Every structure is written in C-alpha cells, then in structure tokens.
Image: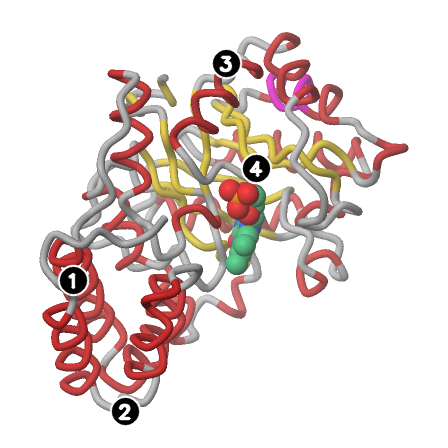
Amino acid sequence: MQIGPYRIDPPVVLAPMAGVTDKPFRLLCKRLGAGLAVSEMTNADPRLWQTRKSRQRMDHEGEPEPVSVQIAGYDPAMLAEAARYNAGHGAQIIDINMGCPAKKVCNVWSGSALLQDEPLVARIVKAVVDAVDIPVTLKIRTGWDRQNKNALTIAKIAEDAGIAALAVHGRTRADKYEGDAEYDTIAAVKASVGIPIFANGDVVTPQQAKHVLDVTGADAVMVGRGAQGRPWIFREISHYLATGETLPEPTPREVCDILVHHLEHLYAFYGELQGVRIARKHLGWYAKDRAENTAFRDVVNRAETAQDQLRLTREYFASLQDGVRLAA
Ligand SMILES: Cc1cc2nc3c(=O)[nH]c(=O)nc-3n(C[C@H](O)[C@H](O)[C@H](O)COP(=O)(O)O)c2cc1C
C-alpha cells in the first residue's frame, strides 16, 4: 500500500501505543519486518513540548523512513501547529489520534471522544491536512458506542479532507478493549471510501492477520498488543502473507539476541536509570504467557542496573537448551 510517496511494504504496521512504541521499540519492530511503525501520541499542546518526555518522543534521528508521528488534541489550530512543528522535527507522516479511549485523553475531549462531534472532526482533519505538505493519516474506532457507530461518516469526512490513509480499530470507544474486535465495520469502511485502510484489533497471529485482511479487504493490518514482547510477529505475518507458510518460533538464542539489542538501545536512549525501569515492562511482556519464562521474569525484575539486567538475561537464555523453542 502507498501513503503519499511512501510504499508501506510489507503491509503490516505497528500501532501507536503510548508508553510502548518509543523509538527503541519502533526501530526494533521495523528491523523485524514492520512496514511502518507509528510513534506514541505526542500532545498537541505546545506548553508540553519542552519536557524531557516530549523531547524523547520527538527524537527521530536515524529512524528509517517513513517516520510517522501521532498527535493528540482537540483544538484544530493547536493540532495544526503540532503537525507543523513535528513536520519540522523529522515527521514524514502525521497521524491524528481519534482512537484512544484513555480517560486522560478523552476527558479533555480528544482521542476517540472526538468521534461524537463530526463537525469538529471535519475541522480538525482539514486544519491538519492544510497545515503540512506531508501525508496525514487518521486513526479511529468504529464509533463512540454501539448505538453511535459512525465510522463510515468519519471515513468520508477524512477522505474529503485529503487524509492519506485511515486506521480503524474494530471497537467502539465504549467497548474499551472488551469483547472481540469486529471486522464488518472495517469492511464497510473499506468498501465506502477510496483511501487506503489499516485494519486494527486483536491480531496476534499470522493466520489472524490474513483472515482480517481477507474479510475486511483492508490494505494493511495494524498490530498493537500482539507485538508486545513479540516484535518478530511482523516478519512472521509478512512471511505468512507472502508464502502461506508459518515461520518457526524464534529459538532462545534468537530471542536473547533480540532482547539484548532492545535493552541496550533502551539504556542508550533513556539513560541507565530510566532505561532499566522501562526495560522491566518489556521483559515482562517477553516472559508473558510462557510458563518456562516466569522464572526469567522473577530474576530480571530484581536487577537494578543495566549490567545486572543484561547479565541475568544472558544467563537465563544460556541456561535454556539451545534448540528449545519458546512456547507460543
Ligand atoms: C498500552 C496501549 C497504549 C495505546 N496508546 C495509543 C495511542 O497512543 N494512540 C492510539 O491511537 N492508540 C493507542 N492504543 C490503541 C492501539 O493503537 C490499538 O488501536 C489497540 O490496542 C487495538 O489493537 P490491538 O488489538 O492490536 O492491540 C494503545 C493501546 C495500548 C494497549
């Protein structure tokens, strides 16, 4: 699929996730096969841009193109300004967040709360598209709640305003993350507009990715939680889409190499103290749902320094018999 001048290949992308899709994780997912990796949301309020957190979020130095930066807010002029600012600081695609159900976002009338106010959506997308000469994408849910599913109307508004691609998470805001994502609405959106569509929601295996693409007709699949602790899911999906074959699970040695590389990048990017803390979250995900890894999580969580975290990680994987594959 194409977003402006950028070919998104393979059509498998990392969803924006606050607190997760930082630069180290985006680079890792791209290296392991993601065709695009969207940044964590950056607040559109300029008063927050000089905090350390915002500066880290806006650091795109050395990031392979296209660099997609998500902005969140409610005020068209402020979002337009944020788009301009990010375009001047390395963004090659601007993504507008109208999908996030988080209270912190919705209480100030942004994220998926915006879906309730279609005229405001129209003003926002127009203001942002007009503000920059790079592609602008939009991320939405299927509506505010099941009685008010307006994804088709929003998609039309987006297309008319010149949005370059639309990501649809197959849940309403009221659904939060409950129940299963539904793909019928995504299929209806795809059928009703001409712009490329990312189908999003609950994709955790290559087979599901193919199923979602087949039933929605979407141009690409967007993976969020399925990539937590499993960044190799992108190469698994793209291989399966291309060949119909399933790649074997990575060996402990491969997982160890990926993990060590990830940890080293976290320390380099955030500094040791913050890096070790952020790494714990990822280590927990790498260990999640894998019985044999519970011991690993307990061990690495005790590490207070980068040196200890790395040593314990290496020791743990060295202790696993080579050739033993991690259970899915
Ligand atoms: C921890 C976390 C943080 C998220 N942060 C954002 C965000 O900043 N912006 C956004 O548009 N969506 C955000 N989302 C929603 C995801 O992008 C995605 O739409 C959702 O998780 C469904 O996809 P999945 O089933 O593949 O996880 C977040 C989701 C999670 C789990």
Local packing at callout 3 (Cα closer than 10 Å; few below 14, some 14-19, many 20+) is: few
Mark 1–mark 4 Cα distance, whole angstroms, equals: 28 Å
Local packing at callout 2 (Cα closer than 10 Å; few below 14, some 14-19, many 20+) is: few
Which dot marks residue 236? none
Q: Mark 1, mark 4: which one is toward the viewer?
A: 1
Looking at numbered disc 1 in the image, what kind of residue is underneath it?
Cys
Looking at numbered disc 2 in the image, what kind of residue is underneath it?
Glu
Mark 3–mark 4 Cα distance, whole angstroms, equals: 14 Å
265, 135: nearer the viewer: 265
Whether tag 1 and tag 4 are in contact, CB under 8 A, the answer is no
How far from the left and from the top, in percent, is residue 254? 14, 53
Mark 1–mark 3 Cα distance, whole angstroms, equals: 34 Å
Whether tag 1 and tag 3 are in contact, CB under 8 A, the answer is no
Determine the secondary structure under disc 2. loop
Query: Residue 76 vs residue 326: left or right?
Result: right
134, 61: nearer the viewer: 61
Q: Which residue is mark 3?
A: 214
Q: Residue furthest right?
A: 147
